[in-house]
Amino acid sequence: MKIISLIVCGLMLSLLPAFAGPVNKICPVKGKAADGSTAVEVKVGFCCGRCVSKFEKDPAALLAKVAKAADGKCPISGRDNDPDATATISVAVCCGGCKGKVAKDPKKFLAKIASEKKDS
């Protein structure tokens, strides 16, 4: 029964990004409007399912923590990541060039989105 629950939970987590919109409306590279038709999928690692759930409730509120988290560490607890505890967020960009820049260094642009949300 536990295995079935884990499989169902994993399936739900993998399908969630398909239904969730991007965490931003302005391209973090150029500052232009971004409608979400061009986006970068950013995978975020966590230590456990509880931290994944906290993040999925309001990913935009935790973007600054994700941007500051050390590689391999949970942005919420600071513990080592569990390879099975991940979430994916969508970052909208205005064009293919910006998509490549965000994909290369997502933490830099997540920090920028977080600071813009904080200022507004």
Image (spheres, rainbow, N blue to C red):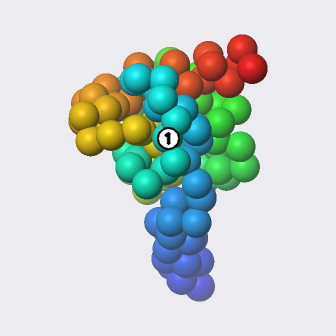
Looking at the image, residue 112 sits to the left or right of residue 56; the answer is left
- Seen from the viewer's position, the closer of residues 120 and 77 is 120
Residue topped by disc 1: 34
Q: In the current view of this chain or complex, which residue is farthest to the front? A: 32
Query: Where residue 64 appears, x then y in whole percent?
Result: 59, 22
The local secondary structure at tag 1 comes to: loop
Q: Is 48 located above or below residue 11 in the figure?
A: above
At 54% across and 83% down in the image, what residue appears? 4
Query: Where residue 28 appears, x then y in whole percent?
Result: 46, 26
At 28% across and 29% down in the image, what residue appears? 101
- Seen from the viewer's position, the closer of residues 17 and 49 is 17
At 41% across and 23% down in the image, what residue appears? 30
Quadrant of the rendered image containing residue 40 = top left
Looking at the image, residue 73 sits to the left or right of residue 56; the answer is left
Location of the C terminus (image quadrant): top right
Q: Is 114 located above or below residue 15 in the figure?
A: above
Query: Where residue 37 appears, x then y in whole percent?
Result: 43, 54
Number of marks present in the image shown? 1
Would you say residue 30 is visible in this rendering? yes
Q: Dot 1: few (<14), some (14–19), or many (≥20) neighbours within 10 Å? A: many
Give the amino acid at mark 1.
Ala
Would you say residue 89 is visible in this rendering? no
Query: Where residue 46 appears, x then y in whole percent?
Result: 51, 42
At 25% across and 34% down in the image, what residue appears? 97
